């Protein structure tokens, strides 16, 4: 059977990246609806496998997922087109937002609104950190969480190690904990 | 600023992180702490803009590039954002064969737990910069509670927080 055309794949990923707020989770939901339920270009299990594995690849998971899904549909040209289509509209919008912000930041009401937005961003980062820990959170695993998450926080906040050194050390500590039988 | 160097530093952050926001720790370390090319205020503003725009969370890197080197810098930020996606295809093929290996999964779990800690550590100086009085603290706690408890998109929480701050300054 002939696969979907490159233009149709690009248009679908463009729509998914341009009209969805909420980041990767929302884009994934839209892609599942369009690719699996409506167009039937992929099976649900195939989509689920790609989405699950994409979380284990470096970088932004939804971009890895988009590249791999499109690659399954139309090879490398489709993968390139999908990643560009899903990420470029948001990039232009960010530039417009920042450009506009730099022009009006001196206005008092803008400064007030921005200060309100920034405190929410701090909360957002804290909550997204918790969301990473949440799947592992249990009484049995508290030693691992305190050592790896708490240790990484302390090491970076104190400036003792660089982030990459901390990640490398975390792998070693995790393996040592495994050897010691710590859950 | 050398654009290739900028691309390499930004790509380092995306190639060593495992979700949109975990690159933040490396970005802050490289550009705010070590090279002092960016302020915490600019970093937080780029993140806010990233969350107000549609698309992937990691797109805030385009804003970082823009602050560092204008539109060419933004292009470098975008390239750094998308580079790992193309590496993902051979990695996915490999992972499909090895993802069930216990040692591999444990190592990845360790990286994810440490990434959460790094992300939190990066938020601490941003909080110092953004939360300057008890009203800011209250608003931040309320935003965190809404994000944790309610199924509300972060886009609306950021807008709501901005509107609340604006409303407070109007009535006080």
Image (tube, coloured by chain):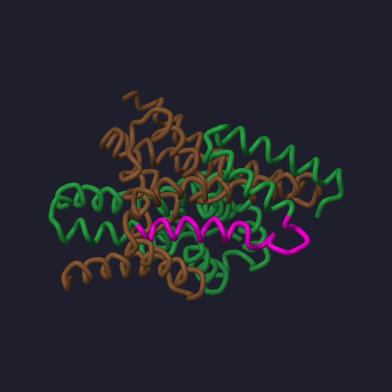
Chain colours: A green, B brown
Which one is nearer the viewer's eye here, A29 or A7?
A: A29
Q: Looking at the rendering, which quadrant does residue A112 occupy? A: bottom left
**Which corner quadrant of the image does residue B164 belong to?**
bottom left
Compared with B79, B168 (above or below) is below
* Residue positioned most to the left: A107
Q: Can residue A29 be seen in this snapshot?
A: yes
Relative to the observer, which residue lies in front, B29 or B12? B29
User: Looking at the figure, which quarter contains the C terminus of chain A?
Assistant: bottom right
Check if residue A106 falls in the magenta segment: no
Q: Count the numbered circles shown.
A: 0
> What is the x, y in percent for residue B89?
60, 45
**Residue A35 placement, left or right of A23:** right
Helix, strand or loop for the magenta stretch, by majority? helix
Q: Is B85 on the left-hand or right-hand side of B77?
A: right
Question: Percent from the top left, x then y, of residue A25?
Answer: 51, 64
Classify B155 as above or below B45.
below
Q: Is residue A127 magenta?
A: yes
Q: Residue furthest bottom?
A: B150
Q: Position of residue A106 (x, y in %)?
A: 14, 50
Q: Residue furthest front?
A: B134
Locate the N terminus of chain A and report the quarter of the image it occupies. Answer: bottom right
Residue at 53% from the left image edge and 45% from the top image edge: A59
Q: Position of residue A67 (x, y in %)?
A: 53, 50
Which residues are the magenta region? A119-142
Determine the residue positioned at 31% across, 50% down. B45
Residue A74 visible in the displayed image: no
Nearest the viewer among B9 and A9 is B9
Q: Is residue A155 left or right of residue A93?
A: right
Residue visible at 32% across and 54% down in the picture: B132
């Amino acid at each position: 059977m002939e696969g979907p055309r490159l233009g149709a794949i690009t248009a679908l990923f463009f729509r998914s990246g341009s009209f969805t707020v909420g980041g990767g989770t929302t884009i994934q939901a839209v892609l599942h609806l369009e690719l699996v339920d409506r167009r039937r270009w992929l099976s649900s299990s195939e989509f689920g496998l790609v989405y699950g594995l994409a979380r284990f690849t470096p970088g932004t998971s939804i971009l890895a997922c988009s590249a791999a899904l499109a690659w399954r549909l139309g090879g490398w040209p489709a993968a390139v087109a999908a990643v560009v289509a899903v990420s470029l509209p948001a990039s232009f919008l960010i530039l417009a937002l920042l450009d506009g912000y730099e022009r009006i930041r001196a206005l008092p009401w803008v400064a007030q609104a921005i200060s309100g937005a920034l405190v929410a961003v701090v909360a957002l980062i804290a909550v997204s950190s918790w969301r990473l820990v949440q799947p592992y959170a249990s009484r049995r695993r508290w030693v691992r969480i305190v050592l790896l998450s708490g240790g990484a926080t302390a090491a970076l906040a104190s400036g003792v190690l660089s982030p990459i050194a901390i990640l490398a050390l975390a792998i070693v500590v995790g393996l040592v904990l495994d050897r010691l039988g710590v859950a | 600023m050398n654009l290739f160097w900028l691309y390499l530093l930004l790509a380092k952050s995306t190639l060593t992180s495992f979700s949109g926001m975990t690159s933040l720790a490396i970005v802050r370390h490289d550009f705010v702490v070590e090279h002092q090319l960016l302020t915490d205020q600019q970093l937080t503003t780029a993140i806010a803009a990233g969350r107000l725009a549609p698309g992937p969370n990691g797109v805030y890197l385009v804003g970082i590039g823009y602050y560092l080197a204008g539109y060419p810098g933004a292009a470098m930020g975008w390239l750094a954002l998308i580079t790992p996606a193309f590496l993902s295809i051979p990695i996915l093929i490999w992972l499909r064969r090895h993802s069930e290996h216990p040692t591999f999964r444990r190592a990845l779990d360790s990286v994810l737990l440490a990434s959460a800690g790094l992300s939190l550590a990066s938020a601490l100086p941003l909080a110092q910069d953004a939360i300057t009085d008890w009203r800011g603290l209250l608003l931040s706690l309320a935003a965190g509670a809404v994000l944790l408890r309610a199924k509300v998109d972060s886009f609306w929480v950021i807008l709501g927080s901005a509107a609340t701050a604006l409303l407070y300054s109007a009535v006080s």
